[in-house]
Image: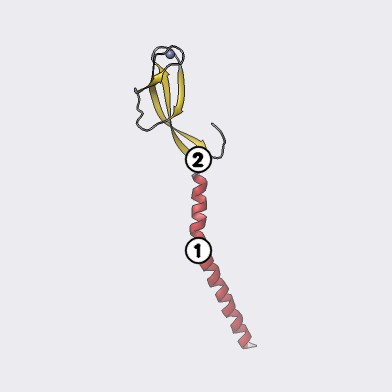
């Protein structure tokens, strides 16, 4: 009877040790799962381009090398120069389709 009780404590200790081991193994996974949830909000560089002559304005995805004041094209309304007027960071939630 006494031996069986000792065996029980041994099993219990093993289960606790295994549970702790499992917890330590799962912890990095849990942390990465939590951080991937915060990564769902994506940051995107957007720029506003506008016509120098009229009030035409449009926003587009920022392209490497673009800067405020750079001529990026011509106005569809009157053919005047289109320049980058502003560059900003836009935060948008991921998972939305089409934009
Ligand atoms: Zn224009």
Q: Residue at x 54, y 70 (%)?
A: 18
Could you say whether the residue bearing mark 2 is in a helix, strand or loop? Answer: strand
The type of colouring in the image is secondary structure
Residue 9 lies, in percent from the top left, at: 58, 79
Q: Residue at x 42, y 22 (%)?
A: 49
Q: Check whether the beta carbons of the residues at disc 1 and disc 2 lie within 8 A of each other.
A: no
Q: Label 1 belongs to which residue? A: 25
Does residue 46 appear to the left or right of 23 in the view shown? left
Q: How many marks?
A: 2
Front residue of this view, candidates 8 and 29: 29
Does residue 98 appear to the left or right of 89 in the view shown? right
- In this rendering, the answer to whether 82 lies above or below 18 is above
Classed neighbour count for the residue bearing mark 1: other residues with Cα under 10 Å, few (<14), some (14–19), many (≥20): few
- In this rendering, the answer to whether 5 lies above or below 49 is below
Quarter, ligand 1: top left
Q: Residue at x 50, y 45 (%)?
A: 38
Front residue of this view, candidates 57 and 80: 80
Using the rendered view, name the quadrant where residue 1 is placed: bottom right
Which label was assigned to residue 63? none
Could you say whether the residue bearing mark 1 is in a helix, strand or loop? Answer: helix
Does residue 24 appear to the left or right of 74 in the view shown? right
Q: Label 2 belongs to which residue? A: 41
Whole-Å distance between the Cαs marked 1 and 2?
27 Å
Asked if disc 2 is less than 8 Å from ligand 1, the answer is: no
Residue 80 lies, in percent from the top left, at: 39, 13
- In this rendering, the answer to whether 61 lies above or below 27 is above
Q: Specify which label sits upstream in the sequence, 1 or 2.
A: 1
Q: Residue at x 34, y 31 (%)?
A: 65
Front residue of this view, candidates 25 and 44: 44
Classed neighbour count for the residue bearing mark 2: other residues with Cα under 10 Å, few (<14), some (14–19), many (≥20): some
Residue 28 lies, in percent from the top left, at: 48, 58
């Amino acid at each position: 009877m006494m031996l069986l009780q000792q065996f029980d404590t041994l099993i219990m200790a093993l289960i606790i040790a295994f549970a702790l081991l499992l917890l330590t193994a799962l912890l990095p996974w849990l942390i990465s799962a939590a951080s991937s949830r915060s990564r769902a909000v994506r940051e995107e560089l957007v720029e506003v381009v506008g016509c120098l002559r009229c009030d035409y304005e449009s926003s587009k995805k920022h392209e490497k090398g673009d800067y405020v004041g750079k001529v990026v094209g011509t106005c569809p309304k009157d053919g005047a120069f289109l320049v980058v007027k502003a560059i900003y960071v836009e935060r948008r939630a991921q998972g939305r389709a089409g934009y």
